[in-house]
Image: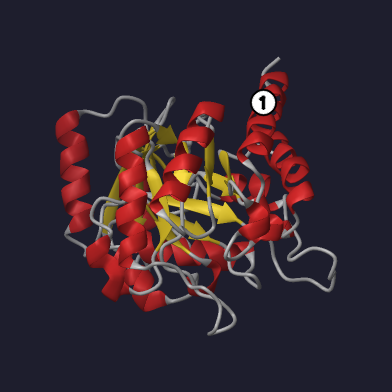
Amino acid sequence: MIVLLKKKPGKDELTNLVEWLCSMGLDVHVSEGKERMLLGLIGDTSCVDIDLIRALDIVDDVKRIQEPFKNANRKLHPDDSRIDLGVTQIGGGTFQLIAGPYLIETEEQICTIAREVKQAGATMLRGGAFSPRTSPYAFQGLREEGIRLLLAAKRETGLPVVTELMDIAQLEYFDDVDVIQVGARNSQNYELLRELGRLRKPILLKRGSANTMQELLMSAEYIMAGGNENVILCERGIRTFEPYTQNTLDLSAVPALKELSHLPVIVDPSRAVGIARLVCPMALAAAAAGADGVMVEVHNDPQHALCEGPQSITPAEFAALARKVNSVRSALTC
């Protein structure tokens, strides 16, 4: 439920209204937009007397939210959210270029890539330490040693880092990680999402390969319901009948999710297409669609990568991608 307030409500009146609503067992989210203030009521609102609230002097209108996701709903939070990453932000008009290897192999590899992508314009470093692989015999990351190497690259370059968490038992290694990634396979692992809701660290939530947009937003709701509002949505392609690409990149999800939700939306074209030569065109399309950033896999020697080499671009190719993405964004603001 949303309570729309009249312009410039009195401080005492606002405080009394919020306390009264909280006394009903509701969580009250206060959102101050550019033109007006609103209160988002989270919880069982079935017993709330809408007419009684609407009759208050400081209240303009009361509306029920029909969608099952409340915290992530743009109706509750009209302005775009900005997620603080320390040295930078994501959302609200900013654009992040996130680059790095699918999996960290050696300290030299991750530090070399980190230096080169930063020079090319990357604003965040990605790198996998824990990875769910379809085959139990495939390389699945260096685990806690991979986190140590990723943080070494962070210290050398100053880039904020993002890496995937597979299990809550691994959380002890993520204290100095700037953004925790929840992969597609865990996008509906509700116990994991609940636990991440207890943190205040940014969470990059990937869409599951068979998830609808509403299901993605409901996964975000699990995190936000726990009190962690620092959620970044990631479109990474969905499974369709088309076998040419690894997945089918659903770029319509970018404007649709931004219409439904205030949360930042980024795109991972590498996981979507699985073919290096298609990554740049899809990154440009994501920027044109209004994404808040793109996350691409970059390897200094893709032919000899321990995994996912065919979808990884080189640092030089990333530099070209970054220039083209910036040109697209510049064109959009003209």
The residue most toward the top is 334
- Front residue of 233/144: it is 144
Which residue: 26% across, 52% down?
200
Q: Is residue 13 left or right of residue 183?
A: left
Q: Quadrant of residue 45?
A: bottom left
Give the image location of residue 130, x and y in percent.
42, 68
Give the image location of residue 120, x and y in percent.
56, 29
Give the image location of residue 139, x and y in percent.
52, 73
Packing grade of label 1 (10 A; few <14, some 14-19, many >=20) is few
Q: Which of the image's four quarters has the N terminus?
A: bottom left
Residue behind mark 1: 323
Q: Is residue 152 left or right of residue 305?
A: left
Give the image location of residue 134, x and y in percent.
59, 80
Which residue: 63% across, 63% down?
308
Which residue: 63% across, 59% down?
304
Residue 62 visible in this rendered orientation of the protein: no
What secondary structure is found at the residue carrying circle 1? helix
- Front residue of 200/147: it is 147
Q: Is residue 9 left or right of residue 280?
A: left
Residue 181 visible in this rendered orientation of the protein: yes
Q: Which of the image's four quarters has the C terminus?
A: top right
Circle 1: residue type? Arg
Q: Quadrant of residue 235?
A: bottom right
**Count of numbered badges drawn on the protein:** 1
18 relative to 306, above or below: above
